[in-house]
Amino acid sequence: MIIAVASGKGGTGKTTVSASLASIWEEPLIAVDLDVEEPNLHLFLTPQIQGRREAHMEVPVADESLCTRCGACSELCQFKAISLLGEVLLAFPEMCHGCGGCLAVCPAGALTPGVRELGEISWGRAGDARFLMGRLRVGEAMSPPLMRQVKDQLNQMLAQTPADVIIDCPPGVSCPAVNSVMDSDLVLLVTEPTPFGFYDFELAWRAFSDLGKPMAAIINRAGVGDRAVYDFCAAQGLPILGEIPFARAAAEAYSKGQVLAQATPELNQAFRAIAGRVRELAAGAAAKEAAHA
Amino acid sequence: MLEIVVISGKGGTGKTSLTGAFAHLAQNKVICDLDVDAPDLHLLLHPKHAREEDFYSGHEAVIDPVRCDLCGVCQEKCRYQAIDEIDGALKVNPVKCEGCKVCVEFCPAGAIDFPEKHCGQWYESETRFGPMVHAQLFPGEENSGRLVALLRQKARTLAEERGLGLILCDGAPGIGCPVISSLSGTDLTVAVTEPTPSGRHDLERVVELCGHFRIPTGVIINKHDINPAETAALEAFCAEKDLRLLAKLPHDLAMTQAMVQGQVITEYQSQGLAELVRKAWDEIMGMADLVKAA
């Protein structure tokens, strides 16, 4: 089963929940950080990194001497990554989305594949779990291409040895966030009961409902703010799998890089209960899907 | 004209709560929410929309099943695995489609349409603190960078029309497309962080990004009293990178209580945290004077 931990609003506790669940998960597990812009899961799981590689995307390299100035490439490119300015052919590799269209359409062989560095993918072990993360190169604007490569690697790892997967997702509800929950069996929405938390929670709920994903909520910093998110969950029939009470001690534990589920016996118990309900829900969702297929 | 963007790298450090307070304190400005994906500033400022416009950007491929002869060339050419065969028909998965037009170009049957995409809405509004420009991208959409660029353009036009000298922007979390778009041409960034491993890690990356664009950056350490050792590490980082430490603010639930009331902290209270936030704004203005002089 693949569990995506997402949130809408940033800083609500996605990584806290991901790291905590990973630390107490009893089945074989791969913990994945898909928040490639600001990956933080490794700061809490402190994995032993066993391998890393640069991730690249194919971009065009222009050879002016072969170019016939037909303009087919610049006409096709939707991203202004290649253009014919008068008689000059210019490639802007940082704008390229790697679709390969210009390379395929050029009749003169004036474009050849080059590469742009997207960032780095690394993997290793965190306790009994396997670990995988992507880290976007600072200055790189596009996270989805790197996320796709991390997911490809995840699929290879799963093919070798099957396991459950917990994905720490990026915040928000735009393209990167939707990409990261797309292949999951269950989306866990971590929120805080504040106006900001609730507004972004509702955005995320709407976005991921469109994907037809089963969802459940975890409420962090319970006790601050208001009741709006509880009312909403009740009205929508969205299960709340657990609450993490607001406590200064929890904030301090987090600030020291501690995994919350390991901070106190009570929190450990609370996360074990959450993990149990997560497994139940995800297994139910997977069974439903299998029945449909 | 001066443009200030408040960013953070990590989400949830207090960016928007502080930007809201700065919007209260600043004079003669246009307020701009550049977090078009999960915007929250409107929850404090309650903007009244004076103008509402559709945002169109990019295109998406749509296969016409009548014209399609199922040759599969589109599937072969698509690098995003966005085309699936469902019930004997080829369909584009709009979530995966990048709008690159490669399938449209190479379809031998000319069966793929390529309509423009309606990606969101943007607004010009009035608030109790002055005019505001903001937007809402539809869920799952890309091109947030283009929408950010559009908002900044609209904010500049509005500032010129009304003779306002400052554009104050709430940025998005992360270091990707929308953040890069919000940094280009900015005079000054204020990075809000917190004394946690994630806060420091993400600050380092966002500061490196600001360095790429050679933008002067000041730092606010929020919730500094949660972890004095981490706060000291953040201060050392600021000193090492020559970043101006603008303020250290304590963890205080008054910030959340103000939010619940739909107020900014400087409206909610006059003493305590509000006083420190006012001082932080004075520091930002002081830094802005230095930037303008340079």
Image (cartoon, coloured by chain):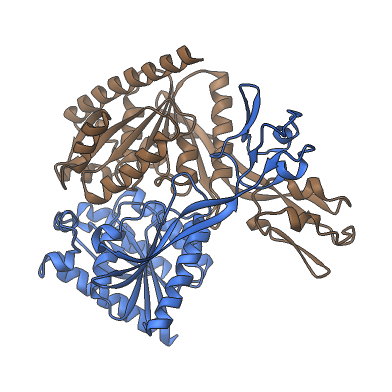
Chain colours: A brown, B blue
Task: Please state the horizontal and vertical placement of residue B275, each as a whole percent of the image.
Answer: 15, 71
In the depicted structure, whether residue B288 falls above or below residue B197:
below
The residue lying furthest to the bottom in this view is: B293
Left or right relative to B58: residue B227: left
Give the left or right position of residue A133, taking residue B231 as reference.
Answer: right
Residue found at the far front of this picture: B66
Q: Depth check: B271 or A185 in front?
A: A185
Query: How many numbered tags mark residues here?
Result: 0
In-front residue for pair B36/B210? B36
Q: Is residue B151 left or right of residue A26?
A: right
Q: In this view of the protein, can residue A140 be seen by the observer?
A: no
At x 30% / y 50%, what residue is drawn?
Answer: B196
Write the residue at 23% across / 75% down.
Answer: B25
Q: Is residue B27 above or below residue B177?
A: below
Residue B251, image x, y percentages: 18, 56
Residue A140, compared with residue B66, is above or below; it is: below
Toward the viewer: A201 or B5?
Answer: A201
Q: Position of residue B90 (x, y in %)?
A: 65, 29
- The picture places residue B11, in percent across and down from the top left corner, at 35, 51
Which part of the image, by quadrant, shows the N terminus of chain A?
Answer: top left
Answer yes or no: is residue A170 visible: yes
Pick the front one: B70 or A42? B70
Tell me where residue B187 sits by quadrant.
bottom left
- Which of the 4 quarters of the picture holds residue B281? bottom left
Residue at (65% x, 45% y) in the render: A56
